[in-house]
Image: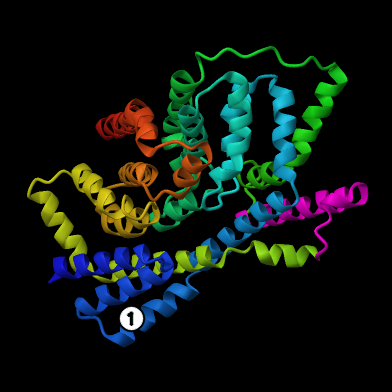
Amino acid sequence: MLILSLVVSIFVTLFLVNKKLNIGYSLTIGSFLLAMLNGRSFLRFLEIFKETLLEPTTISLGSTIALITILAYLMDKYLILDRMIVALEKILRSAKATILVAPALMGTLLVSGGALMSCPIVGSLGDRLSIPNDRKATINLIFRHALYFVFPLSPAILLAAEIGDFRVIDFIKLQFPIAIVLYVFGYIFYLRNYQESKAEKINIKQYFQAFSDFLLYASPILISLLGVVAFKVSFHISLLVGIAISVGINQYDKRRDVKYDLQEHPLKTMYKGVKVPMVIAIVGIMLYKNTVNEIDEIIIFLNNLLEQGMPIELLIFLSTAVLCFPLASTNPGIAILFPMLLPLAPNYETKLLYAMFIYTSSFLFYYISPLHLCQVLTLEYFQVRVKDLYKNYLIILPLTYGVMVVIYFINMIFN
């Protein structure tokens, strides 16, 4: 009955998400079915739901995600990010370096399908370097998503840390080589062989002006990160400061140029920036986690499976393929597999390694899914066929995944 309940729960969740129902609602229904099919009463499920809503982790994570979406929305609407990219190109003095960094910076906005925002930048710089469209599309996607493994404000990383009950910095340190390798391989395969003309000369005053512009327009993100990483301030406080800086920049801009005036109160703009579906998704994810934790038989079943000889790595790989590829999302892998598999780890270090294996495998299948919105929009923008894009992935993605596997087994041996 346990296996049937898991299959039904996951199948219904995947089916509903494919029907465009918010993943939070879908996971809530999946949680309900899982609880009912395993003999929990309706009243007990309501208790779990209430506990989830009032749980400090749910409240903290949901509010953090809401603040991140507000900051991203403000930086977009106030044209702050655009000017940050312009200043960056003047600083780097290289179209190659800018085309490498720009999609990543755009990726900090963390909006669904946000890769479309960096397409014009990659397109323009790519034309200067005579890069064909299939490679432009690959560059836009690879360099945008490399930060996925290390960006401290990434909802996926925050979610993983909260559900896995480990420190964000420990997870980032473990995955840092994966991000570096993806950037290095991306440069070698897609940028190294292109020649670029010398950048237009600027004097030292213009250079320092560009540098100061970059610091100004990057400050909402930089302050948000520094507050957490360097000064150990909570995410909420750091993000509120970043939001306040964005509003302050806009207030200054409006006095200089009317094009920066949105004709609405900043609080209204902030309100529009809250992505309620993302917050609902967090509630659904936390509810599914708590429902799984309620059913001890799941842990016993998985232990028996592993005792019978199935490698946990194979279990993770196959499970993430089933969960993440059809939905083009890493969240199902994190939400469903973390609470099932991480409790099997004998110590903190092994738990981190299991989390990395699940996270990277989930990312891989999300990334190559034909429903991956960033990929769909990028292909449409550059008028590229998906098979041409996949040809460019044939080496870089297996190599990157292989680096994760090497990190995993080396740490397993020496732990």
Within 10 Å of disc 1 (Cα), the crowding (few <14, some 14-19, many 20+) is many
Q: Which residue is mark 1?
A: 45
Q: Nearer the viewer, residue 61 or 95?
A: 95
Please tell me which residue is depicted at 65% across the width and 58% down the height of the picture: 70
Is 31 included in the stretch rendered in magenta? Answer: no
Q: Nearer the viewer, residue 356 or 253?
A: 253
Q: Residue 76, relative to residue 148: is it above or below?
A: below
Q: Nearer the viewer, residue 4 or 128?
A: 128
Res. 345 in view: no
Is 244 included in the stretch rendered in magenta? Answer: yes
Residue at the farthest left position: 308
Image location (x, y in percent) of residue 116: 56, 44
**Overall secondary structure of the magenta stretch?**
helix
Q: Give left or right: position of 282 versus 265.
A: left
Q: Give left or right: position of 311 versus 410.
A: left
Image: magenta residue range: 235-264
Please tell me which residue is depicted at 46% across the width and 50% down the height of the picture: 373
Kind of residue at disc 1: Phe
Image location (x, y in percent) of residue 103: 57, 36
- In what quadrant of the picture does the N terminus appear? bottom left
Provide the secondary structure element on which disc 1 rests: helix
**Residue 6 falls in image quadrant:** bottom left
Residue at the farthest front position: 383
Image location (x, y in percent) of residue 123: 59, 31
Q: Residue 382, relative to residue 267: is it above or below?
A: above
Q: Residue 247, relative to residue 106: is it above or below?
A: below
